Image (cartoon, rainbow, N blue to C red):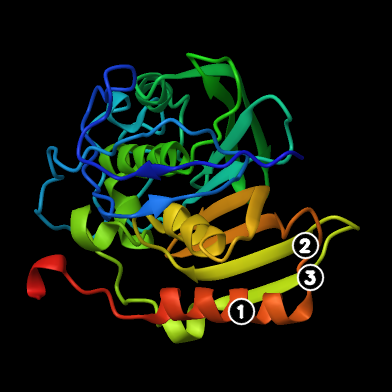
Amino acid sequence: MAVAMASCSLGVNLNSNCSLKKPLAIPLQTGATVQGSFGFGSKSFFIVQKGRLLSSSTSTTPQASSATAVEGGKPDGIQSETDKIPIPKVIIDQDSDPNATVVEITFGDRLGALLDTMSALRNLGLNVVKANVYLDSSGKHNKFAITRADTGRKVEDPELLEAIRLTIINNLIEYHPESSSQLAMGAAFGIVPPPEQVDVDVATHISISDDGPNRSLLYVESADRPGLLVDLVKTVTDIDVAVESGEFDTEGLLAKAKFHVSYRGKPLIKPLQQVLANSLRYYLRRPMTEEGSF
């Protein structure tokens, strides 16, 4: 796959073609500049940092007040206060469809048609070209194939991909407030925060292996946080490694990324693999410091 280079920076507003109907309640880090792939395009994309935060009132297992409030999910009285809260999952897949970005959302059997989520994605300047639902032992899976409205192509901008992820999580917390206890974003913006924080040192796993004659497969697992997808791509491309495509999964408090990477059209040699792994470990394990603290 040809690698398209990108140069984009985080800001505080979406451009006029991609304005949010509802501002994101979850901010991204500012000041990062991405130069690299995922098949990414070059148009800058800015993330809304302000917006209505969710209520700070607390309860044991919050329930939505009506069927409408859960985007067509279970109405009141069907799920009990003692139901075990499932692990929310949001998958952004750049591999399975050459013409569209595939998004999959799972939250046990609690999700409905997700019409509000589809509307929020359209407000990011996207088209939902295909949607389907399937059931398995883990619950109901809602899958969307989305493209950019301006080009009709799959999403290749890492900041727009992160905005898609945060928009979905934002809607999930808003319409299913009980999910906040299972999501890293719930610590700051949910009704019920996670009962404990993930130990980054324990949760971080990085592996790199050959993936054919022209590329390698990079796997990263770590504690989730806003802006993580963008920052991972920046960390990789800062050492001139190209990210060609991949998949980024949010599973509860964890994030799992699989990136197809290459160096000048070849797999990464062992010394470069070590440099990349060390760079990612340093980034993922370093303490997060507020800019205003200096």
Q: Residues within 10 Å of mark 2 (few under 14, many from 20)?
A: many
Classify mark 1: helix, strand or loop. Answer: helix
Residue position marked by numbered label 2 in the rendering = 216
Where 234 falls versus 277 (above or below)? Answer: above
Image side of residue 292 versus residue 28, left or right:
left
Q: First in sequence, mark 3 or 2: give its number.
A: 3
Residue position marked by numbered label 1 in the rendering = 275
Q: First in sequence, mark 1 or 3: give its number.
A: 3
The amino acid sitting under disc 2 is: Ser
Q: Nearer the viewer, mark 1 or mark 3?
A: 1
Could you tell me residue 262's position as x and y percent? 73, 58
Could you tell me residue 185's position as x and y percent? 30, 57
- Spatial distance from mark 1 to mark 3, Cα to Cα? 14 Å
The amino acid sitting under disc 3 is: Ser
Q: First in sequence, mark 2 or 1: give its number.
A: 2
Residue 209, disc = 3
- Could you say which quadrant of the image residue 209 lies in? bottom right
- Could you say which quadrant of the image residue 59 lies in? bottom left
Could you tell me residue 196's position as x and y percent? 31, 77
Residue sitting at 56 percent across and 24 percent down? Answer: 146
Image side of residue 254 versus residue 178, left or right:
right
Q: Residues within 10 Å of mark 3 (few under 14, many from 20)?
A: some
Could you tell me residue 236's position as x and y percent? 55, 63
Q: Quadrant of the C terminus?
A: bottom left
Residue sitting at 56 percent across and 46 percent down? Answer: 91
Q: Are marks 3 and 2 in contact (CB under 8 Å)?
A: yes
Residue 263, disc = none
Classify mark 3: helix, strand or loop. Answer: strand
